[in-house]
Amino acid sequence: MSPRAITDVRAGVVGTGFVGLLHVEALRRLGVQVVGVVGSTPERARAKAAAHALPPVVESLEALLADPSVDAVHIATPNHLHYPQVRDVLAAGKHVVCEKPLALSAAESGELVQLARASGIVHATNFNIRFYPNCRQARALCAAGELGELWSVHGSYLQDWLLLPTDWNWRLDPAQGGELRAVADIGSHWLDLTSYVTGLRVEAVLAELRTFVPLRRRPRGEVETFAGADTDVERADERVTTEDAAFVLLRLENGACGSLTVSQVSAGRKNALSFEVDGSAGALAWSSERCEELWLGRRERPSELSLRDPARLEPEARRATSLPAGHTEGFADTFKELYRAVYRDVLAGGPSERPDYPTFEAGHEENLLGEAIAASARGERWVTVPRSEEA
């Protein structure tokens, strides 16, 4: 029997919002057969499918899982649904990719890690930012000792889509989004990325969480993520308890230090993730707003601005780039390259010994970090981040 090709693989996507559409597009670009999508209701899913040329609508997750031809399922639903839906996917024996956060608590995400390990099923958390080629290049340079001993990592993730009191999204509701909002939504991306780049785990945190817009005007109906404020809809006052911004000091495992600012109320910043790593022999910096550039800082010779060029990238970075130099690769491409790595293991039938993508372990680590950040903010003190085996 000839080996399966990626065009033989069949996948379904649960969730038809902004991120769900990105999952579908990325899978199609790879050649994976997206055989169906599941929405919050069949009616809403059909409307979205008609507007965006999506695959056929499947009535429910249960119906999707009952299809023996489906190899993998992508979960791109509101946060509170991740844990039960991933459990169902694992029980059905399907490979699974889940959006972050993996679950609303570390207890839940830890259980999913154990279930996934026992199943032998390919499992991934959707930390796609790792797959910008220059982020992988930064990791290769750190690992090769180009920066010397790593001393600090610092940066921010800034957005403005929740700046106005009339801005609303399900993430503002703790019942759907969880206790943490900005930290869980975008701060987790920064923390996962910088840990990936430096190879250093966060051991302890000191955090302050702030809600700058405590009273919002909630629409009576559903609102799409990033849809903006429609002043013509009927609204009601709603108290908000989740954080608009977070300010976090970090202690890393080799004695290095760090700092992170996360905000969803920074005017003019649409999706601005940036970080800098400082070491004894040099520094590097990257920003998602200038994703084709990697800054390399030097003391004894001129600093460099390195543009993405497959011919000059380290092998692990070269594997995540498809276009020639000068042809910009961006946010949507990171989804494609993440799934390219995931589906290599899907084709192999199970996880490789050292997966080249963030597994459920990465999702669980961010839940542990998030709970430590929340505890630190409540107690106004440093909090040690438990290791997975201690949780």
Image (cartoon, grey):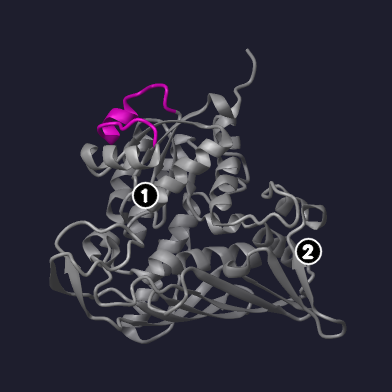
Q: Is residue 309 left or right of residue 179?
A: right
Q: What stretch is highlighted in magenta?
A: 54-70
Which residue is label 1 attached to?
Answer: 111
Of callouts 2 and 1, the N-terminal one: 1
Q: Residue drawn 69% across and 79% down? A: 278
Task: Locate residue 220, reporting x and y percent.
Answer: 14, 62
Q: Disc number at residue 301? A: none
Secondary structure state at the residue bearing disc 2: loop
Screen quadrant of the C terminus: bottom left
Compared with 249, 5 (above or below) is above
- Foreground pick, 54 / 188: 54
Query: Is residue 68 a member of the stretch shown in magenta?
Result: yes
Q: Seen from this angle, which residue lies furthest right?
A: 301
Instruction: Count all numbered tags in the image, as a single digit.
Output: 2
Q: Seen from this angle, which residue lies furthest front?
A: 232
Q: Is residue 82 left or right of residue 194?
A: left
Q: Disc number at residue 144? A: 2
Task: Locate residue 339, reporting x and y percent.
Answer: 55, 43
Instruction: Tell me the distance, in whole angstroms, between the alpha carbons under discs 2 and 1.
Output: 35 Å
Give amino acid for label 2. Answer: Ala
Report the predominant secondary structure element of the magenta stretch: loop
Give amino acid for label 1. Answer: Glu
Q: Residue drawn 53% across and 49% down? A: 335
Q: Give the class, few, some or many, for how many residues have Cα within 10 Å of label 1's Cα (few <14, many ≥20).
A: some
Task: Locate residue 336, reporting x and y percent.
Answer: 56, 45
Screen quadrant of the N terminus: top right
